[in-house]
Image (cartoon, rainbow, N blue to C red):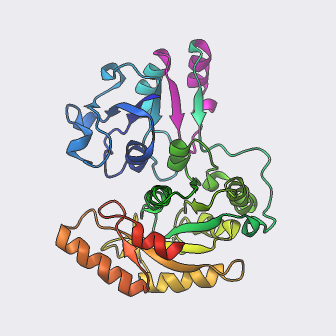
Amino acid sequence: MRLAILAHEQFPDRAKTAVGVLRYADDDVVAVLDRERAGERVREHVPDVQDAPIVASMDDVPDCNALLIGIAPIGGGFDESWRLDVRAAIERGCDVIAGLHYFLGEDEEFAALADDHGVSLRDVRRPPDDLTVAEGTAGEVDARVVLTVGTDCSSGKMTSSFELRDAARERGLDAAVVPTGQTGIMVAGWGIAIDRAIADFAAGATERIVQQAGDHDVAFVEGQGALVHPAYSGVTTSILHGSQPDSLVLCHNAGNETFGGYDDFALPSPAEYVGLYESMAVPISPATVDAGMLNTADLDPDEAEAAVADYADEIDAPATDPVRYDADDVLDALL
């Protein structure tokens, strides 16, 4: 598929969906929409993903099949400043893919236009209608189940899941990512956005998708939120219990001391988090934190190397930055 990605005023630092698709999806990204950076290129900001021009609007986008909303704002709302580009995409015959809590398919204007032009509005955060409570059976799958967990939101859980999958495949293992959020679903083409499930059904939704991946050698479950996050701890707990993991990977942003967007709340230390996650998991599954992933994007090479070593010491487990380095030592610990 030939994609355009909408990331107005957010690329790259606050457009993690855009960056995730650029890094891991098989689609050909023909342009990124960002009014503030129009005329630049993706590689000037994120050098380790596929390159594309950055343009101001859909009027500047080459031929493509779909427009993907590459921003995941707090609360998942739709910014009305995007409406002109979404409308233009539909009128050009492009599908529109979104991972918002605001469903484009329920927007009267977009729904009517999509019907007129024969295109699809794909709201990947819309959950199945037949979800149920968990039965506690995810632990029965044949796959080794590895769950990425975090000290905060946007701490590298999705990135770590895909990097670990790719490293496992390089060893000849049949490995899969179990997507639990909108970006992972867009990349992998399947999954359930657990944060959109009814609270009683969230663990059951996780259980379902783990079972769907249960015939692989190893299933890397994409975590969400953080266990003591002031807003998103619920989805984290549902995934932790619903997936019944065999092993945990603790993801952290180097230097973070408070929750993103919640500066009045201090992060527990990574070592404290190890105890929190393990004690919360053990009544349901005997998972331990067997490895760590550290995002060192803001550090220079010497600082990054030292930070990874310190992080490994603090959590008493192998650690790496899977984008800057590789995931081999971490994968050894998990398998």
Residue 63 higher or lower than 186, as above or below: above
Picture residue at 45% right of the left edge, 15% below the top: 92
Q: Is residue 107 magenta?
A: yes
Picture layout, residue 111 above or below residue 7: above
Q: What's drawn in magenta, residue-wise?
A: 90-116
Which quadrant would residue 144 be assigned to in this image? bottom right
Mark yes or no: residue 206 visible. Answer: yes
Q: Nearer the viewer, residue 98 or 246?
A: 246
Toward the top, the furthest residue is 116
Q: How many marks?
A: 0
The residue located at (59%, 13%) in the rendering is 116
Give percent across and percent down for residue 87.
47, 22
The residue sitting at 29% across, 67% down in the picture is 296
- Asked whether, in this view, residue 298 is left or right of residue 144, the answer is left
Q: Is residue 16 above or below residue 136?
A: above
User: x and y percent of residue 275 in the render?
Assistant: 53, 86
- Does the magenta-highlighted stretch encompass residue 218? no
- Please tell me which residue lies in front, 10 or 314: 314
Q: Quadrant of the C terminus?
A: bottom right
Is residue 76 visible to the viewer in this orientation of the structure?
no
